[in-house]
Amino acid sequence: MKKTIFFASMILAIACGAPKVATTTAEMNQSDADRAAAKFPGTTLADLQKGKTIYEANCGKCHKLHAPNSRGEEGWKKIVPPMAKKAKLDDASMDLTLKYLVTMSEVK
């Protein structure tokens, strides 16, 4: 009985420590960068990748990461600025995160 409780506790502890990730992620490519640059002139694939890294490293600390396509452009533009302030992101990091989320929100 003690072993069962011990192992159940261990499994629960491991499950609670699992990373909070989006249910879907898409690999970015040059066509994504082209789409981003059309909407946000000068945006590169490297910018999108930085935005994704910032999103995954900072936003998942407090809540489950949402797939970029879980919201549209207006939804992300409404949510990201106040959340970036809570996460203490600088303006450049917020901008990269928003560009990543808005661009990838169009991928189904």
Image: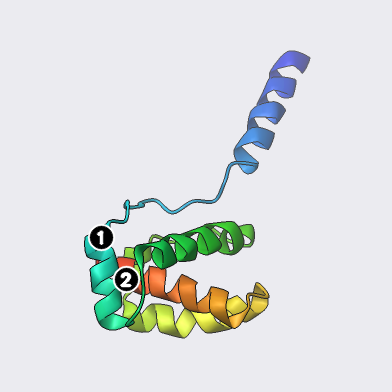
Kind of residue indicated by mark 2? Thr
Percent x, y of residue 59: 57, 64
- Is 35 rendered above or below residue 62? below
Circle 1 residue: 30
In terms of image quadrants, where is residue 89? Answer: bottom right
Check disc 2 and report its element: helix, strand or loop.
helix
Residue found 40% across the figure and 68% down from its top:
100
Position of the N terminus by quadrant: top right
Does residue 36 show up? yes
Residue nearest the viewer, comparing 52 with 40: 40
Residue found 40% across the figure and 65% down from its top:
48
Of mark 1 and mark 2, the one earlier in the sequence is 1
Check disc 1 and report its element: helix, strand or loop.
helix
Residue found 65% across the figure and 42% down from its top:
17
Kind of residue indicated by mark 1? Gln
Query: What coloring was used for the rendering?
Result: rainbow
Tell me if 23 is positioned left or right of 55 in this view.
left
Residue nearest the viewer, comparing 29 with 88: 29
Residue nearest the viewer, comparing 5 with 79: 79
Q: How far apart are marks 1 and 2 (CA)?
A: 12 Å
Tell me if 76 is positioned left or right of 32 in this view.
right
Q: Nearer the viewer, mark 1 or mark 2?
A: 1
Tell me if 33 is positioned left or right of 46 in this view.
left
- Is 21 rendered above or below residue 108? above
Circle 2 residue: 103
Percent x, y of residue 61: 63, 59
Q: Counting other residues with Cα less than 10 Å from the Cα at mark 2, is it few (<14), some (14-19), or many (20 or more)?
A: many
Tell me if 62 is positioned left or right of 77 in this view.
right
Q: Counting other residues with Cα less than 10 Å from the Cα at mark 1, is it few (<14), some (14-19), or many (20 or more)?
A: few
